[in-house]
Amino acid sequence: MTFKPAVWPRKLRSQEWYSGTSRDTIYHRGWMKNQGHPHDLFDGRPIIGILNTWSDLTPCNGHLRELAEKVKAGVWEAGGFPVEVPVFSASENTFRPTAMMFRNLAALSIEEQMRGQPIDGAVLLVGCDKTTPSLLMAAASTDLPSIVVTGGPMLNGYFRGERVGSGTHLWKFAEAVKAGEITQEEFLEAEESMSRSSGSCNTMGTASTMASMAEALGMALSGNAAIPGVDSRRRVMAQLSGRRIVQMVKDDLKPSDIMTRKAFENAIRTNGAIGGSTNAVIHLLAIAGRVGVDLTLDDWDRCGRDVATIVNLMPSGEYLMEEFFYAGGLPVVLKRLGEGGQLHKDALTVSGETIWDEVKDVRNWNEDVILPVDKALTNQGGIAVLRGNLAPRGAVLKPSAASPHLMKHRGRAVVFEDIDDYKARISDDRLDIDETCIMVLKNCGPKGYPGMAEVGNMGLPPKVLKKGIKDMIRISDARMSGTAYGTVILHTAPEAAAGGPLAVVRTGDMIEVDVEARRLHLDISDAELEDRLSKWRPGHERAESGYAWLHQTHVTGADTGADLDFLKGCRGSPVGKDAH
Ligand code: FES
């Protein structure tokens, strides 16, 4: 840890707007006073933007206005001046065609809000899947002092005495209906149990994973990730974070001081230990790209390869985030990684302390939830990165959510050209498919869908489900919900819509998967593959205008984080000209 706090007091960027007696200053300051702010609030104290992703249409973040009040209280207490700023909120469960298409638009707009407005530091008030990475990307690009406060997970759901995990049980119930195991009426009845309090998904889905990634990166106070959304300690966390950001501004403790290569390696290993979402791969690659850390897919495979999954949460395990919190939460996991030599202990956090200092004295209160290493769900908890002629730039698989008997398999491809083709044919009893086949879905990548939909865990054909089969190998250029499970190979790059080899797979081709050898092979000759690729032509619609055009034209591959190519890198927060 080499960070040296800046000298305080000093002139902050917000004073470019509010300090002095010029006409422009009076213009900026005077307008702010219509909200009843006394003159002495503009005396050079840190102005803290509370970047709030609250929205009625982002239900997972629906309680963030209440949390914002606690953040404000903390900022006031520490001598700062809080300003709440609504920002782009991409809800996972409402945005079409997919929230992922708007992660970069959100990051772009929020970056400019941070740079173009008079704030000295930011509290990133987030929760739902894409809100956490988009605000971290914006903070990384502006490099303004920032701290993450997540809204926390929902309380456990229960249906007929059984725990119900967000998303995970949606997939399970849907497949049970298709298999004739439960009725549609029972499915509707179960709906009421799925979201019983404020907060984000209560499984170790993408929201909980990204909250954990923020904490493992050092960008949130220790213990933030697991506190339930309705727990009073969530509000305490918000208030403490409000206090802390004021000191971070005074010290000039920036994202680039915290999100170093060591921090990213800590996060990758943490993702393996928690059985985290494959979506973290894309988001961390994108965040790293913004802050200037050269993170690659190979880092994911290398760092995560020998990490044991010790958090027994759905979708890989049996419990939910509420129990994870009671067991001690992420600090226990970080401590375990540190004891096993799998944590860079000297990585700095927003607290100003090292990550090890934050966690070294915590205890595990429930070894059924946070397992001893010798009872780990799997010893290969990281993300496996497969390569071969079918995925020259890589594809990913989450071993902890996959079936051991399918980790080495050769099967006949059954190809769906896009998600509509899949939907049209999957339930047709005439579809020539059985459980030994490999389902292949094309044109669902960053350019193709567009936006890289979470459809990679496509449901199995009903005629296979009715045999009691729960898993088959599925390969696509899509993503998968963090709440989903199965032997699902995702993020195949280059994607089909960009002319990757996935585009030329045909039904009847044989495909070989060998996770141990990290191999994904289309069993045709090199000459045949070359011939098919030379004849391939883009077949899918391209937007001709608007953001969809910008996205399809500039989005990079999944292997580099699916960011917009012109947004990579840190542009800082220089104060621009005043045009008034
Ligand atoms: Fe928003 Fe899961 S859909 S957190």
Image (cartoon, grey):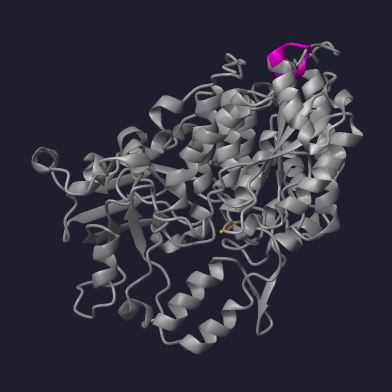
Q: Position of residue 193 (x, y in %)?
A: 64, 76
Residue appearing at x 78%, y 15% in the figure: 19
- Is residue 471 within the magenta segment? no
Nearer to the camera, 31 or 75? 31
The residue at the point 35 percent across, 59 percent down is 474
Split into quadrants, the picture shows ligand 1 in the one at bottom right
509 horizontally vs 258: left or right: left
Q: Quadrant of residue 269?
A: top right
Spot occupied by residue 462 in the image (x, y as percentages of width and height): 34, 79
Q: Which of 482/304 is in front?
A: 482
Q: Height in image: 260 above or below 324?
A: above
- Marker count (numbered): 0
Q: Residue 193 vs residue 403: left or right?
A: right
Quadrant position of the N terminus in the picture:
top right
- Residues 229 and 367: in front is 229
**Where's residue 396, x and y in %?**
42, 46
Q: Residue at x 63, y 47 (%)?
A: 53
Please tell me which residue lies in front, 367 or 8: 8
User: Is residue 21 rendered magenta in the image?
Assistant: yes
**Camera sees residue 197:** yes
Quadrant housing the C terminus: top right
**Residue numbers of the magenta segment:** 16-23
- Does the image show residue 347? no
User: Where does the image place residue 467, in percent across and percent down from the top left?
Assistant: 36, 82
Residue at the far right: name it. 77
Residue 254 appears left or right of 177: right
Q: Is residue 500 above or below residue 60?
A: above
